[in-house]
């Protein structure tokens, strides 16, 4: 009972602000609210309750948290377009200040696909191939910092790749697609490495199941991102064809 209470509290804390903002603005598509609610559920289940407790000593549970916190939740949050909603409900002066910050050199650097990939996939390689994984199980501070990085890096990576939300430094479609292919390869290689090299406290059986979960479970989310990217390309081609027809008319 206590687990469900804590999960519900975290879920409400994450979901409520977006739902309230959507009510204030009005006219927001229901699917965007649903995306945010699902993302909030992914985070709630991954940071509290029995799954979060099992993740401290059971590698398969840890990998489930990784998929929920670092891949599923970021995807649903990006599709909910929180930045776009925030800019629409903020006072004009504050929104303009945010727009200026988004155009800084740092914002351009951090929103580059290669930077986002290094922070996301590179961070996972550092976690599982160094003593950081052991450290996160021995220190709650390190544990929370690692999980915060996993979520933020996953969100940044997904936000940069997809054109769903506001991004003044959106890279060309071909560059984003190429980076996605590289990131998928790096993610899959890491899964295979974990299959053969069990991390701290994980048995060989746990490592094999967790690695397979990382490989195939992550593949499902990556397939969704690929589909969304291809759909963006398709829409762009349609618009270009329409412009050519109008220009020749």
Image (cartoon, rainbow, N blue to C red):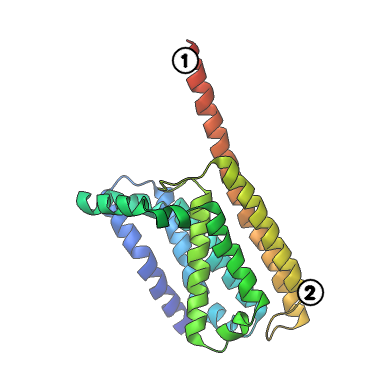
Number of other residues with Cα within 10 Å of mark 2, as a class: few under 14, some 14 to 19, many 20 or more: few
Q: What numbered label is drawn on residue 203?
A: none
In the rendered image, is residue 216 in sight? no
Which residue is pictured at 51% across the width and 48% down the height?
A: 162
Residue 206 at x, y = what percent?
73, 78
Q: Is residue 116 left or right of residue 226?
A: left
Q: Is residue 172 left or right of residue 14?
A: right
Depth check: give the residue in front, 180 or 28.
180
Q: Is residue 53 left or right of residue 205?
A: left
Q: Could you say whether the residue bearing mark 2 is in a helix, strand or loop? A: helix
Q: Could you say whether the residue bearing mark 1 is in a helix, strand or loop? A: helix
In the rendered image of this protein, does residue 11 appear above or below residue 19?
A: below
In the rendered image of this protein, does residue 186 appear above or below residue 61?
A: above
Number of other residues with Cα within 10 Å of mark 1, as a class: few under 14, some 14 to 19, many 20 or more: few
Residue 153 at x, y = what percent?
51, 64
- Residue with the mark numbered 2: 196
- Do residues under tags 1 and 2 come within 8 Å of each other at their CB atoms? no
Residue 73 at x, y = what percent?
50, 62
Which residue is pictured at 65% across the width and 82% down the height?
A: 58
In the rendered image, is residue 153 in sight? yes
Residue 132 at x, y = what percent?
60, 80
- Residue with the mark numbered 1: 247
């Amino acid at each position: 009972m206590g687990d469900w209470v804590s999960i519900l509290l975290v879920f409400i804390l994450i979901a409520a602000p977006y739902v309230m903002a959507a009510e204030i603005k009005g006219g927001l598509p229901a699917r965007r609210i649903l995306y945010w609610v699902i993302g909030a559920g992914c985070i709630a289940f991954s940071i509290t309750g029995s799954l979060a407790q099992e993740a401290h000593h059971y590698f398969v549970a840890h990998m489930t948290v990784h998929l929920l916190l670092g891949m599923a939740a970021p995807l649903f949050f990006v599709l909910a377009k929180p930045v776009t909603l925030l800019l629409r409900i903020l006072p004009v002066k504050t929104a303009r200040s945010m727009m200026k910050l988004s155009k800084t050199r740092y914002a351009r650097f951090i929103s580059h696909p290669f930077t986002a990939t290094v922070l996301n996939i590179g961070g996972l390689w550092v976690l599982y191939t160094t003593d950081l994984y052991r450290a996160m199980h021995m220190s709650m501070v390190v544990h929370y910092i690692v999980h915060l990085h996993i979520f933020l890096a996953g969100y940044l990576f997904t936000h940069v790749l997809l054109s769903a939300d506001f991004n003044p430094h959106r890279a060309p479609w071909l560059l984003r697609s190429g980076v996605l292919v590289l990131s998928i390869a790096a993610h899959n290689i890491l899964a295979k490495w974990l299959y053969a090299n069990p991390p701290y406290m994980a048995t060989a059986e746990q490592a094999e199941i967790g690695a397979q979960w990382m490989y195939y479970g992550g593949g499902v989310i990556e397939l969704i991102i690929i589909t969304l990217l291809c759909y963006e390309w398709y829409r762009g081609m349609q618009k270009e064809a329409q412009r050519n027809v109008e220009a020749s008319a």
